[in-house]
């Protein structure tokens, strides 16, 4: 994502009371973005909705299909994790 787009998202979340930015510990004192209590509650609601949707979508799978689906998700997570590795993003 472009830095300007991420900055707009962070500003929007902050204005909605979902995140807060604070200065990190010395010596570098980087800024740290954290969810507020309201942000944590919103994230918990999204997680619960995701769990409900996934349960609904997979309810009719038999054991073999469920295992195959789990394997596919694990493979996708592995591939996405490898794609996000620092050496793949050009980050030192």
Image (cartoon, rainbow, N blue to C red):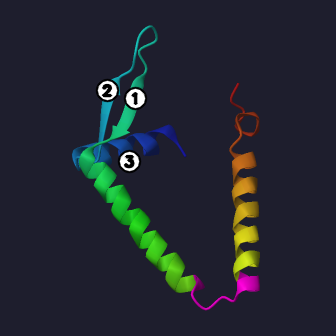
Few, some or many C-alpha atoms within 10 Å of disc 1 (few <14, some 14-19, many ≥20)? few
Mark 1, mark 3: which one is toward the viewer? 1
Q: Which mark is residue 32?
A: 1
Q: Are marks 1 and 2 in contact (CB under 8 Å)?
A: yes
Q: Is residue 16 left or right of residue 45?
A: left
Kindly state the secondary structure of the residue where label 1 is placed. Answer: strand
Q: State the quadrant of the C terminus.
A: top right
**Viewer-proximal residue, 51 or 30?**
51
36 lies above or below 72:
above
Residue 78 drawn at (x, y percent):
74, 54
- Residue 9, given in percent of the width and then of the height, sits at 38, 47
Q: Is residue 16 left or right of residue 2?
A: left
Q: In the rendering, at what x and y percent does residue 69 appear?
A: 71, 76
From what the image shows, is residue 90 above or below residue 42?
above
Q: Are marks 2 and 3 in contact (CB under 8 Å)?
A: no
Q: Foreground residue, 20 or 12? A: 20
Cα–Cα gap, marks 1 and 3: 15 Å
Q: Dot 3 corresponds to which residue?
A: 9
Asked if residue 60 is among those painted magenta in the image, a careful observer would answer yes
Tell me, for residue 22, which label it has, or none: 2
Kindly report the distance in space between the C-alpha atoms of the residues bearing marks 1 and 2. 5 Å
Give the structural element (helix, strand or loop) at label 2: strand
* Span colored in magenta: 58-65
Residue shown at 48%/78% (left/top)?
53
Neighbor class of circle 2 (other Cα within 10 Å; few <14, some 14-19, many 20+) is few
Q: Measuring from the top left, give residue 66's x and y in whole percent.
A: 69, 80
Name the residue furthest bottom.
60
């Amino acid at each position: 994502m472009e830095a300007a787009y991420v900055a707009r998202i962070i500003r929007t979340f902050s204005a909605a009371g979902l995140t807060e930015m604070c200065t990190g510990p010395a010596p570098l004192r980087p800024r740290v973005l954290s969810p507020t209590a309201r942000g944590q509650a919103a994230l918990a609601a999204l997680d619960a909705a995701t769990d409900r949707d996934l349960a609904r979508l997979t309810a009719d799978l038999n054991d073999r299909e469920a295992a195959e689906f789990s394997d596919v998700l694990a493979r996708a997570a592995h591939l996405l994790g490898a794609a996000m590795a620092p050496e793949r993003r050009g980050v030192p």
